[in-house]
Image (cartoon, rainbow, N blue to C red):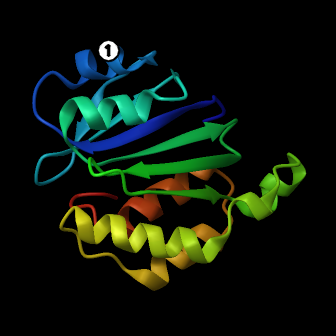
């Protein structure tokens, strides 16, 4: 751990890597299958509209986590109907990067995460989502994994 890049979690059929490339993702790595059709794919970089392009082309909801040196992560989730939410992982470390924490308020992120989970048929754990969005860890990837579990993604660890 120590690279930037990110992970994308989506329930999609078809050739996911091809769809991701068409949406503007680069450096796409192996895909890990979760349960119930959900997949996690790591990537090196994504364009500003890559997540929206992918959700539109697949008709599937997705959550993207972009890492900054494994220290901090930006979370963005989207549904095909345009519902979205954003969050920040490892807030205390983010302060050291001079990331404006006020641009990532916790309560709207928790509410958005709960709505996103419900919209995709998952059963989220509100307390665990809150803890993940306010907690800290040595590596932001640990918080990202905890967030996927808290959102109720089947097979997330």
Placement of 84 over or under 3, stated as above or below: below
In the visual, does 69 lie left or right of 152?
A: right
Residue placed farthest to the front in the image? 81
> Which residue sits at x=54%, y=68%?
109
Could you tell me how many numbered marks the image carries?
1
x and y percentages locating residue 102 in the rendered image = 78, 64
Query: In front here: 46 or 134?
Result: 46
In the visual, does 81 lie left or right of 148?
A: left
| Quarter placement of the N terminus | top right
Placement of 70 over or under 108, stated as above or below: above
> Which residue sits at x=14%, y=53%?
35
Q: Quadrant of residue 150?
A: bottom left
> Which residue sits at x=22%, y=58%?
155
Query: In front here: 138 or 153?
Result: 153
| Quarter placement of the C terminus | bottom left
x and y percentages locating residue 152 in the rendered image = 29, 69
In the visual, does 97 lie left or right of 12?
A: right
Residue placed farthest to the bottom in the image? 127
Q: Which residue is mark 1?
A: 22
x and y percentages locating residue 50 in the rendered image = 43, 27
Q: Quadrant of residue 21?
A: top left
Query: In front here: 100 or 44?
Result: 100
> Please, what secondary structure does the residue beneath circle 1 have?
helix
x and y percentages locating residue 75 in the rendered image = 53, 51
> Which residue sits at x=61%, y=39%?
67
Q: Residues within 10 Å of mark 1 (few under 14, many from 20)?
A: some
Placement of 22 over or under 31, stated as above or below: above
In the visual, does 111 lie left or right of 134?
A: left
């Amino acid at each position: 751990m120590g690279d930037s890049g990110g992970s994308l979690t989506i329930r999609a059929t078809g050739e996911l890597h091809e769809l991701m490339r068409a949406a503007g993702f680069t450096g796409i790595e192996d895909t890990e299958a979760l349960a119930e059709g959900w997949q996690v794919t790591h990537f090196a970089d994504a364009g500003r509209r890559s997540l929206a392009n992918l959700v539109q082309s697949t008709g599937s909801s997705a959550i993207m986590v972009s890492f900054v040196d494994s220290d901090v992560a930006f979370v963005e989730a989207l549904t095909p109907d345009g519902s979205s939410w954003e969050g920040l992982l490892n807030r205390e470390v983010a302060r050291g990067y001079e990331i404006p924490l006020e641009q990532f308020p916790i309560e709207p992120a928790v509410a958005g995460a709960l709505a996103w989970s419900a919209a995709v048929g998952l059963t989220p754990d509100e307390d665990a989502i809150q803890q993940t969005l306010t907690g800290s860890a040595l590596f932001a990837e640990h918080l990202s994994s905890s967030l996927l579990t808290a959102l109720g993604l089947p097979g997330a660890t």
